[in-house]
Image: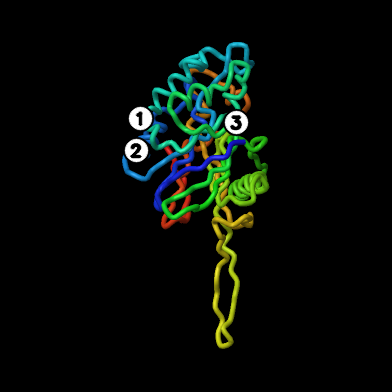
Amino acid sequence: MELLKVNVPSNFDCALFGDNHKGSKLEYTKALDNCLDWVISEPNRFYFHMGDCMEAITVDDKRYQMETQTDPIPLMQARSVVWQFAYTQERCLGWLMGNHELKLWRFGNITRDIICKELAINYCGYSCAVTFNDNYGKMFKWHLRHGIGSNLVSNAKDEEQRIANMKATLKMRLKRKAGDCILMASGCTHKLLVVPPVKTLYLTDDGESLHQHYLKPEPTAEFIHPDMRWYINTGTFRKSLGIGFTDYAELKGYDPLVIGHAIVEVRDRKIVNVREVEFE
């Protein structure tokens, strides 16, 4: 785990994305480029990369298939990542290591020693706690990690219930990882899910009439109730299927997934919204 401090404006937007798997034919490069162009098109826009920036599957891996690769050499995949992201490096707040890069540990830490070093950006490890500061001091903290142990699945027959079950699992797996973070996010599963804080109503009276209120978290508190936090699964830029070849995702029978990412909107030092961005 890494501890990170970043300085940002009191109003900013931050894209959370990853799992683009550079080197795979299924990387949706156009969508990723659109995301990066969005980041640099206006001031006060930033991003975190949530890991699995490269396919990182070597020829001795059971998942390796030559026809699914645009570049089968992991080192060259890392160089391609550096080249693609170089024009956005000043907007990158941090970069996480994914399980695909981690599997190449015997060759060294590719995320830290190649990608982050050459781009001169913050290395976030597999998980990190990020403290955000502006000109007025501490704003809040986020907990970011690549994976949450296993995939998010639900066998519910109703579609709304299926999605609700996956969101509940996401929240359950993240909420105990930190007690003082207003936002908790993970990548890895390739699902795009946003769980906002629960709107909890309570009543008070002034001796003459009743008044309604909603619970609000204190963003800098030592403990923030799990129901008062944001939870995000940050999507993917890797397609599920390709034409003319068979990928390991198809062999495992994975369902098609949304191509997209999340954007956190901060206004007046508070998170006011997290929106999902989808690409066709």
Secondary structure at badge 2 equals: helix
Q: Quadrant of the N terminus?
A: top right
**Which amino acid, mark 2?**
Ile
Identify the secondary structure beneath mark 3: loop
Tell me the mark number nearer the camera, choosing from 3 and 1: 1
Q: Which residue is mark 1?
A: 87
Q: Earlier in the sequence, mark 2 or mark 3?
A: 2
**Real-space Cα distance between discs 2 and 3?**
33 Å
Query: Closer to the N terminus: mark 1 or mark 2?
Result: 2
Identified by mark 3, the residue type is Tyr
**Residue marked by disc 2:** 40
Query: In this view of the protein, can residue 41 be seen by the observer?
Result: yes
Residue 254, numbered label: 3
Image quadrant holding the C terminus, namely top left
Say left or right for 121 vs 99: left
SS for dot 1: helix
Image point (63%, 26%), residue name: 252
